[in-house]
Amino acid sequence: MISPDVSLVDLQLSQPLSLGVLASGKGSNLVAVADAIAQGKLNAAIKVVIYNKAQAQVKEKAAELGIPSVFCNHRDYPNREAFDQVLVDTLKAYQVHWVIMAGWMRVVTPVLINAFPDHVINIHPSLLPSFKGINGVEQALAAGVKITGCTVHLVRPEVDSGPILMQAAVPIFAQDTCEGLHQRIQQQEHQILPGAIALAAQQEN
Ligand code: GRF
């Protein structure tokens, strides 16, 4: 397993970062960021979690962590831009400065990206620029590559592009299933996401 120097997480920030998390799934990355904050590795506060799937487990994770959560159903809006405007309004209402897409299964538009210039961060389960889009883990397995991993990057309008903040590599073994490989990738995601957030904030200063 190849991963970055975890001391990168321990960057000195003058002010606590004000984070908003967008998530559609289990919320293990939300927990990883919350744990890093609780352990004093990341000087930040998670102001709100927005989720777009009513059954998403991230809702319970947020409740356990004592973080407010807001359900925004994309099906209630006529297009992506209208949905993103609701996200922006909600994030601003919670005084969020950094938007963390932690398993957000929606394509975002310039409405969101331009409301938080260079402050929208995504985590993706492959070594970008390889295997963009959905099913990044399946794509790597199908391609027969021997190393995959995860990437944290700043968000740009083109899906899974944008400046890379941090990556971790994960070997693929002959007997790997998609599920098992994804679990190992997620272990690395949880390591690099807090550090990448701190790095993005440091680069701004
Ligand atoms: C992660 O593997 C992330 O890379 C992908 O969605 C998954 C979210 O996992 N974009 P979780 O909900 O944080 O557990």
Image: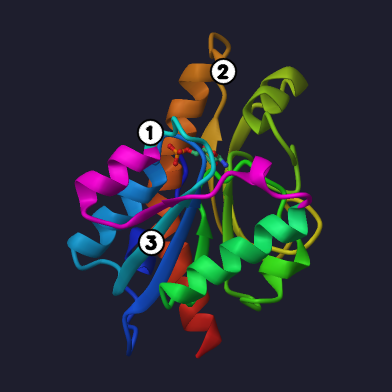
Q: Is residue 19 shown left or right of residue 103?
A: left
x, y (%) of residue 130? 75, 41
Residue found at the far top of this picture: 175
Residue corresponding to mark 1: 57
Kindly identify the residue that appears in the image at 73 percent across and 18 percent down: 142
Can residue 127 be seen at all in this image of the molecule? no
**For the residue carrying disc 2, how many other residues have a C-alpha within 10 Å: few (<14), some (14-19), or many (20+)?**
some
Residue underneath mark 2: 178
What residue is shown at x 57% (from left), y 24% (from top)? 172
Q: Considering only order in the chain, which callout, 2 or 1, is on the residue closer to the N terminus?
A: 1
Judging by the rendered image, the residue that carries numbered circle 3 is 48
Q: Residues within 10 Å of mark 1 (few under 14, many from 20)?
A: some
Percent across and percent down for residue 89 are 56, 70
Residue 203 in magenta stretch? no
Q: Is mark 1 within 8 Å of ligand 1?
A: yes
Q: Mark 3 or mark 2: name the one nearer the start of the chain.
A: 3
Q: Amino acid at mark 2?
A: Cys
Which numbered disc, 3 or 2, marks the residue closer to the eye? 3
Task: Label 1, secondary structure: give it.
Answer: loop
Front-most of 135 and 164?
135
**Boundaries of the magenta span:** 58-79
What's the residue at 76%, 67% (across, down)?
110
Q: Residues within 10 Å of mark 3 (few under 14, many from 20)?
A: many
Rounded to the nearest angstrom, the CA distance separating label 3 from label 2 is 31 Å
